[in-house]
């Protein structure tokens, strides 16, 4: 009898709910620790630490349920293996797609914020995430921890299980939808859902999680690094809560960059075996 691959739809929803509960609990714990042990726990360093714990516990729980259903080695199950692609095309494709995608998806988020204005509480959260002055803690959280943990769970464990169970197409949609849901706010969820398609495509075609981790990290860091360099672009990396749209020259640059990024990414897979994870 062939065992079904884990997780399926129910599995990813339950694990995502557990992740959100853990993040809520650890967020409240951080507030207590700030009052008793110092500001470290309220910084991006502390947020990165708690993010690793929340995702680590969720992934460990999921793996404990899947060990009797998925006979693959852990590196295969999570797609931690070399990419099947031509490196130069893949690398520059990711760089351009991450840069351009930030402008395109940022404009979509701007449209959402016009319909549903960003609440004051979320404005404060975004301001803490991206301080005005450069901080290594921000790079640690947004450029390393968030891409590593989110891609390992959503494009690694979740995508592998659902693609084996339902096929790559449904798996891309399911994991992208749950990835959007996990952000718990409409301004990030809309961009996260669409970004999930590109990130899943990277994993599905390359057979590796490393390209999606790189793309996710660059997507997070480009607007931050531009802001720290003094380049504030309305609707892209300006203050949260602003409802301005991106200037047309930057939007056009983003579209061109995204187009060539997708082209180079696709070209990197030409002549390479297309084998789903």
Image: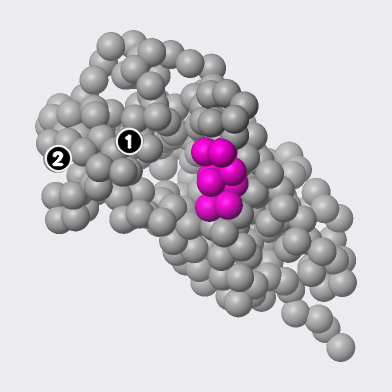
Corner quadrant of residue 144: top right
Element on which disc 1 rests: helix
Residue drawn where x is 81% and y is 81% of the image: 3
Q: Which mark is residue 270?
A: none
Q: How many marks?
A: 2
Residue found at the very far bottom of the displayed protein: 1
Q: Which mark is residue 124?
A: 1
Q: Which residue is mark 2?
A: 243
Residue drawn where x is 80% and y is 49% of the image: 75
Residue 20 in sight in this render: yes
Q: Is residue 110 above or below residue 254?
A: below
Q: Position of residue 275 (x, y in %)?
A: 67, 58
Dot 2 crowding, Cα within 10 Å, few <14, some 14–19, many 20+ = some
Q: Which residues are magenta?
A: 23-32
Type of secondary structure dominating the magenta stretch: helix
Residue drawn where x is 60% and y is 77% of the image: 10
Q: Position of residue 81 (x, y in %)?
A: 75, 43
């Amino acid at each position: 009898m062939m065992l079904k691959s884990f997780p399926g739809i129910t599995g990813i929803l339950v694990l995502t709910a557990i992740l959100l509960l853990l993040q809520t609990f650890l967020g409240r714990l951080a507030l207590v620790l700030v009052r008793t042990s110092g500001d470290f726990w309220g910084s991006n360093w502390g947020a990165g630490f708690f993010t690793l714990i929340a995702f680590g516990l969720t992934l460990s729980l999921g793996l404990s349920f899947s060990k009797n259903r998925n006979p693959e080695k852990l590196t295969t199950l999570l797609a931690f293996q070399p990419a099947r692609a031509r490196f130069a095309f893949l690398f520059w494709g990711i760089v351009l797609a991450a840069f351009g995608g930030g402008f395109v998806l940022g404009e979509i988020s701007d449209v959402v914020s016009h319909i549903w204005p960003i609440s004051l509480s979320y404005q404060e959260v975004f301001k803490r995430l991206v301080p005005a002055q450069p901080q290594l803690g921000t790079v640690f959280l947004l450029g390393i921890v968030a891409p590593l943990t989110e891609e390992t769970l959503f494009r690694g464990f979740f995508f592998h299980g659902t693609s084996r169970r339902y096929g790559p197409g449904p798996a891309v949609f399911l994991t992208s939808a749950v990835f959007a849901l996990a952000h718990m706010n409409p301004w990030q969820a809309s961009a996260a859902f669409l970004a999930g398609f590109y990130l899943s495509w990277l994993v599905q075609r390359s057979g590796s999680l490393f390209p999606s981790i790189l793309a996710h990290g660059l997507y997070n860091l480009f607007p931050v690094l531009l802001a720290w360099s003094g380049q504030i672009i309305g609707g892209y990396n300006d203050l949260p809560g602003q409802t301005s749209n991106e200037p047309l020259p930057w939007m056009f640059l983003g579209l061109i960059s995204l187009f060539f990024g997708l082209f180079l990414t696709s070209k990197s897979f030409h002549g390479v075996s297309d084998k789903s994870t």
